[in-house]
Image (cartoon, rainbow, N blue to C red):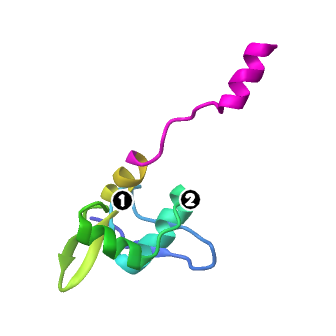
């Protein structure tokens, strides 16, 4: 059975019984993405992304938009690029 998600608004945590279980309403997704991935998105931006088909997968339950944590993590991790060196760092290393 999935444990309820707890949100501590004082800069705290969002947790479930397992890291990828549970779901969040759209209003709580920006805090989740900021805390876990450093993304600064508003609920309005998520709504725009949804209408354009470029946001995380969501479902409607009882008239409310809900995002599964598993899908949020997948969407966020797909947008994080792998580390790369700056061109200036590369030039200094070659010149040395």
In this figure, which residue is indicated by the disc labeled 2?
38
The reply to whether residue 24 is in sight is no
Q: Position of residue 22 (x, y in %)?
A: 33, 66
Mark 1 nearby-residue class (10 Å; few <14, some 14–19, many ≥20) = many
Which of 46/24 is in front?
46
Task: Name the image quarter holding the N terminus.
Answer: bottom left
Residue lying at 40% horizontally and 80% vertically, measured from the top left: 27
Secondary structure state at the residue bearing disc 2: loop
Magenta-tinted stretch: 78-96
Mark closer to the chain start, 2 or 1: 2
Q: Position of residue 4 (x, y in %)?
A: 37, 73
Report how far apart the C-alphas of labels 2 and 1 lie in the structure.
13 Å
Q: Is residue 83 magenta?
A: yes
Q: Position of residue 73 (x, y in %)?
A: 39, 54
Reply above or below: 7 against 75: below
In this figure, which residue is indicated by the disc labeled 1?
72
Residue lying at 30% horizontally and 57% vertically, measured from the top left: 71
Secondary structure state at the residue bearing disc 1: helix
């Amino acid at each position: 059975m999935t444990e309820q998600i707890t949100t501590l608004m004082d800069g705290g945590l969002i947790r479930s019984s397992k890291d990828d279980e549970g779901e969040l309403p759209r209003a709580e997704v920006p805090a989740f993405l900021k805390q876990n991935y450093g993304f600064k998105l508003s609920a309005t931006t998520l709504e725009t992304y949804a209408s354009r088909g470029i946001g995380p997968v969501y479902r409607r339950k009882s008239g409310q938009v809900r995002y599964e944590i598993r899908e949020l993590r997948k969407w966020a991790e797909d947008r994080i690029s792998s580390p790369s060196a700056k061109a200036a760092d590369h030039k200094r290393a070659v010149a040395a």
